[in-house]
């Protein structure tokens, strides 16, 4: 069984065990999300002169299905970030990645009062890179994998209808093809 299939089966079974019949009576609320994203790559000591940070934006929609404080949160997000290859500064030729992220998170929400609550969550992501700008640095679909997986953990708070989240995603599978095998790690705010 492939890594992707094992990952999907694990998330599905975890969801069934956690929420069993309670999910049928759960309250569901949609959450529109947007903000900044900071991406970095795993870089070996031999590549210390290569800058591995990227930044960009994300927008997406999550559903929070919550029976009794616990919640399940599937979503769909669009990530845009620009690669800085070999320099600390962006230049005109640096390519942009466009990435579709499908997260599935499980978490717990602590209500402090009627308007304020704090949340913690963990889960996984399926990432699909659907576009990379044409560039002179050799990054295209012959050098990167268009599908990669990640696990994440995060937290946030709700104040009325507004939410603020910070999520860290650790890449499980490589984005850059052999021999490089670099993984992407994301910080989303």
Image (spheres, helix red, strand yellow):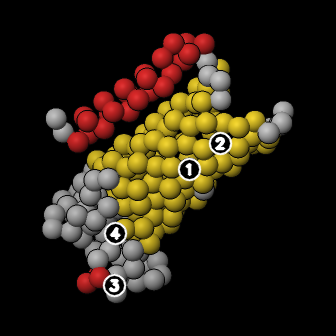
Question: Along the polypeptide, which appears first: circle 1 or circle 3?
Answer: 3
Crowd rating for badge 1 (residues with CA inside 10 Å; few <14, some 14–19, many 20+): some
Q: In the image, is 174 to the left or to the right of 52? A: left
Task: Identify the residue under disc 3.
Answer: 48
Q: Residues within 10 Å of mark 3 (few under 14, many from 20)?
A: few
Tell me the crowding category of disc 4: few under 14, some 14 to 19, or many 20 or more residues within 10 angstroms, Cα based. some
User: To which residue does mark 2 refer?
Assistant: 119
Residue appearing at x 83%, y 36% in the figure: 113
Q: In the orientation shown, which residue stands out farthest toward the bottom?
A: 49
> What residue is disc 4 on?
42
Placement of 151 over or under 177, stated as above or below: above
Question: Separation of disc 2 and disc 4 at Cα?
Answer: 29 Å
Q: CA distance from mark 2 to mark 3?
A: 37 Å
Q: Is residue 181 visible?
A: yes
- Disc on the earlier residue, 3 or 4: 4
Where's residue 188, x and y in %? 55, 56
Q: Disc 3 on helix, strand or loop? A: loop
The answer to which of marks 4 and 1 sits earlier in the sequence is: 4
Q: Is residue 117 left or right of residue 147?
A: right
The CA span between labels 4 and 1 is 20 Å
Q: Nearer the viewer, mark 1 or mark 3?
A: 1
In the picture, measured across the screen, residue 134 lies left or right of residue 17, that is: left
On residue 108, which mark appears? Answer: none
> What is the number of the mark on residue 154?
1
* Residue under the point 33% across and 84% down: 48
The image position of residue 77, as x and y in percent, is 49, 43
Contact check, label 2 and label 4, Cβ < 8 Å: no
């Amino acid at each position: 069984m492939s890594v992707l299939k094992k990952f999907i089966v694990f998330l599905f079974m975890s969801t069934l065990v956690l929420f069993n019949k309670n999910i049928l009576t759960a309250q569901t609320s949609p959450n529109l999300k947007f903000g900044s994203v900071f991406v970095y790559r795993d870089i070996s000591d031999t590549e210390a002169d290569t800058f591995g940070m990227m930044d960009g934006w994300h927008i997406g929609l999550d559903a929070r299905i919550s029976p009794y404080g616990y919640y399940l949160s599937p979503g769909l997000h669009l990530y845009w970030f620009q690669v800085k290859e070999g320099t600390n500064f962006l230049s005109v030729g640096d390519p942009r990645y466009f990435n579709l992220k499908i997260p599935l998170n499980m978490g717990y929400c602590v209500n402090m009062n009627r308007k304020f609550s704090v949340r913690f969550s963990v889960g996984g992501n399926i990432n699909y890179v659907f576009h990379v700008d044409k560039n002179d640095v050799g990054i295209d679909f012959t050098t990167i994998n268009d599908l990669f997986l990640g696990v994440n953990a995060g937290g946030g708070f709700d104040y009325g209808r507004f939410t603020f989240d910070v999520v860290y995603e650790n890449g499980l599978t490589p984005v850059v093809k052999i021999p490089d095998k670099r993984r992407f790690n994301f910080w989303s705010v």
